[in-house]
Image (spheres, grey):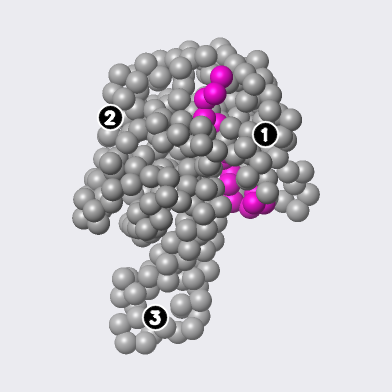
Amino acid sequence: MALVSAKEMLQKARKEGYGVAQININNLEWIKSALSVAQELNSPIILGVSEGAGKYMGGYKNVMGMVSNLIEFYNITVPVAVHLDHGSYEGAYKALAAGFTSIMFDGSHYPIEENVEKTREIVAACHAKGVSVEAEVGSIGGEEDGVVGAGEIADPQECALIASLGVDLFAAGIGNIHGKYPANWKGLDFEALEAVKEVTNGIPLVLHGGTGIPADMIKKAISLGVAKINVNTECQWAFQQATREYILAGKDLEGKGFDPRKLLAPGAKAIENVVREKLTLFGSVNKA
């Protein structure tokens, strides 16, 4: 099956009561690690690409080239979506032109009228190419490529308005944040999630900031209609820690331990471990 829109895989996930992981990718190691574990566990997967990561990897066309070629090279058969994460208005069109199979337009920082207008336009452009669209109401806390949110709680009326535009997946702020959760974090607002569920008419819901949310909260969110959970920081932490341990142990100075293929291998393996853990927790194993 390989490259697909996120729409069908998330509709299936919501109907059957599990979540699909969006693993944000940052380079070749991330792509290989995520794809190999998804294939191993027979799980659908979404590869998320922020605008900053896309630029780092040489542009959206290069990202799609890497993903497409790795899918062919490693004979990946599980469903894979390549998704623009927190895309700007301009970025959404660039990713669409490059062949992304799913687009998030983050209009949460616009006045609701402008968010509606731009979302409606992007939905039409994406659907004409069979590409799924994610929209957001209530900015997610933390920092993502320079966009800072305080973890606002989405307004149900605004959610209903945006959901009515034909979006395929829907992200709402429910107290979740990007990056590390502070010690005084109050947890997810499940009353807010219930309200969002009521007004979005069965659209698969998205939980941003999946790193650090306790397993019981993840499972409850899935039971309330969340079908996509985003994970980024946790993979970065794991990669950093494994790479640091390799260097501190002096292994980069042993033989050809400086070879990038050896130097980056522990970090890549650490990413695989995180992805394996998340796919199991979210319940998507053997759901491809």
Is 100 positioned to the left or the right of 181 in the image?
A: left
On the rendered image, what quadrant is the C terminus found in? top left
The residue nearer to you, when weighing 147 against 92, is 92
Above or below, 60 relative to 114 = below
Q: What residue type is disc 2 on?
A: Ala
Above or below, 88 relative to 283 = above
Residue that numbered label 1 is attached to: 174
Residue 180 visible in this rendered orientation of the protein = no
Q: Which residues are magenta?
A: 201-215
In the image, what residue occupies the spot 45% across and 25% down?
A: 168
Q: Position of residue 275 (x, y in %)?
A: 47, 56
Say which of marks 3 and 1 sits in front. Answer: 1
Residue that numbered label 2 is attached to: 97
Q: Which mark is residue 252?
A: 3
In the image, what residue occupies the spot 52% across and 48% down?
A: 283
Of pointers 2 and 3, the one earlier in the residue sequence: 2
Of pointers 1 and 2, the one earlier in the residue sequence: 2
What is the spatial separation of the Cα atoms under label 1 and label 2, in whole angstroms?
32 Å
Is 199 positioned to the left or the right of 258 in the image?
A: right
In the image, what residue occupies the spot 30% across and 19% down?
A: 128
Q: What residue type is disc 3 on?
A: Asp
Q: Position of residue 70 (x, y in %)?
A: 25, 53
In the image, farthest residue toward the bottom: 254
Above or below, 276 relative to 120 = below
- Confirm or deny contact between disc 1 and disc 2 (CB under 8 A): no
Tell me if mark 1 has few (under 14), some (14-19) or many (20+) residues whose alpha carbon lies within 10 angstroms of its own: many
Q: What residue type is disc 1 on?
A: Ile
In the image, what residue occupies the spot 32% across and 71% down?
A: 260
